[in-house]
Amino acid sequence: MKHIFIINPSAGKRSQASRILAMAEKLRQKHGLDCACMLTQSPGHATELARKAAESGEPIRLYACGGDGTIFEVANGAAGFEHVAVTCIPVGTGNDFLKNFGADMPRFADAENLWDGDVFPLDLIECNGRYCTTIACSGIDARVAEDVHTYGDHPLLSGRGSYLASVAVNFLFKGIGQRWTVTVDGEEVTDEFALVATCNGRYYGGGSTPVPEARMDDGVLETILVKKVSRPTFARFFRPYSDGQYARFPDLARVVRAKEVRIHSDAGEIVTCLDGECFRSHDVTVRLAGKRLNFFGPRGCDCNKTAR
Ligand SMILES: Nc1ncnc2c1ncn2[C@@H]1O[C@H](COP(=O)(O)OP(=O)(O)OP(=O)(O)O)[C@@H](O)[C@H]1O
């Protein structure tokens, strides 16, 4: 069994590469493990490294050392490979992926708790040819995420602080909704939408939980559709939405368990974020992926620990 640490030196406020290198060295000395460390050179490189390792055919444990973007990239390289398992060592800004594990999240920070931990499969969302582990969102929430990195470098703002700054800018200066045709399992609706978010996990945007009942291994995705609203209504809606209280606004938001959701925009581009990584397009297709991700974590950990 090989243990490969894929380290994103640009994740978080400052590089944790030397701490991860020391951690891997400790595993080598203490347990005689076959460990290797690789630093990513650029965006997308973690997918390349993970796929290359997986294609070697050897049994491998991959440690994605970074934030949500890093686990997203490693998952995209490792999905569907039975002999590969993936975990996350949190050194990112938000680390929303690991919040799904509740009180066990801090245990992921030390590889000593991980190297012989439980392996279990997680569902994945497939969106426009890529895999997403937690939430695939399109609309104002994705535009907010697209802008979060602008504020993420600010020394006075935490992960949550950068998120709130981006919400304020998008709310005050950019439109809330867009005219889209949304097709849910073949049923088409053309309307003004604020956002459409498909949830496998429960957290995004520095800790918002739009659909707290979403579970990461149940073979089902929950999609929340939110219509365009006025600024005052959005201001009232935002907090309860972030706290998973969408049911208080039945005229604005509904949650469906759909196999496939398609979004089409004739006008402006749709901004979509997969685990916080954003892209723009006129067509978005989201569905439960045929492939799953073997994940490992500390003994006894539960990806649904915080589910309602
Ligand atoms: N060597 C590199 N140089 C610059 N960017 C990189 C490099 N390696 C990876 N990246 C990019 O860094 C970005 C941020 O990574 P990541 O999301 O893991 O950290 P974060 O933003 O601090 O954490 P979070 O998303 O949890 O808030 C990703 O988009 C990834 O593609």
Image: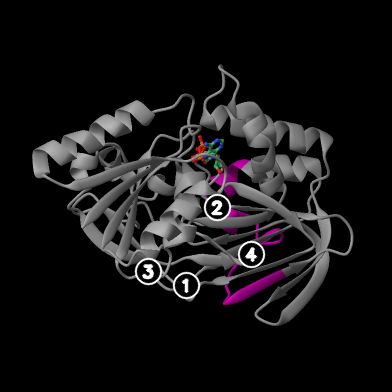
At label 1, counting other C-alpha atoms closer than 10 Å, the crowd grade (few under 14, some 14-19, many 20 or more) is some
For the residue with label 3, is its CB less than 8 Å from the closest atom of ligand 1?
no
Sequence-wise, the earlier of marks 2 and 1 is 2
218 or 9: nearer the viewer? 9
**Image location of residue 44, percent across then percent down:** 55, 49
Q: Amino acid at mark 2?
A: Pro
- Which residue is painted at 48% across and 30% down in the image? 12
Is the residue marked by circle 2 packed among few (<14), some (14-19), or many (20+) residues within 10 Å? many
Which residues lie in the magenta part?
Answer: 239-262
For mark 2, what is the residue? Answer: 210
Tell me, yes or no, whether the two marked residues, 3 and 4, touch with CB atoms within 8 Å.
Answer: no
- The furthest residue to the bottom: 186
**Residue at the spot 52% in from the left edge and 31% down from the top edge:** 159
Tell me the quarter of the image containing the N terminus: bottom left
At label 4, which amino acid type do we have? Arg
Task: Tell me: residue 292, above or below residue 149.
Answer: below
Of circles 2 and 1, which is in front? 1
Label 3 or label 4, whichever comes before in sequence order: 3
Mark 2 or mark 4: whose residue is earlier in sequence:
2
Q: Which residue is mark 3?
A: 81
Q: Identify which amino acid the numbered label 1 is placed on.
A: Val
For residue 220, which numbered disc appears in the image? 1
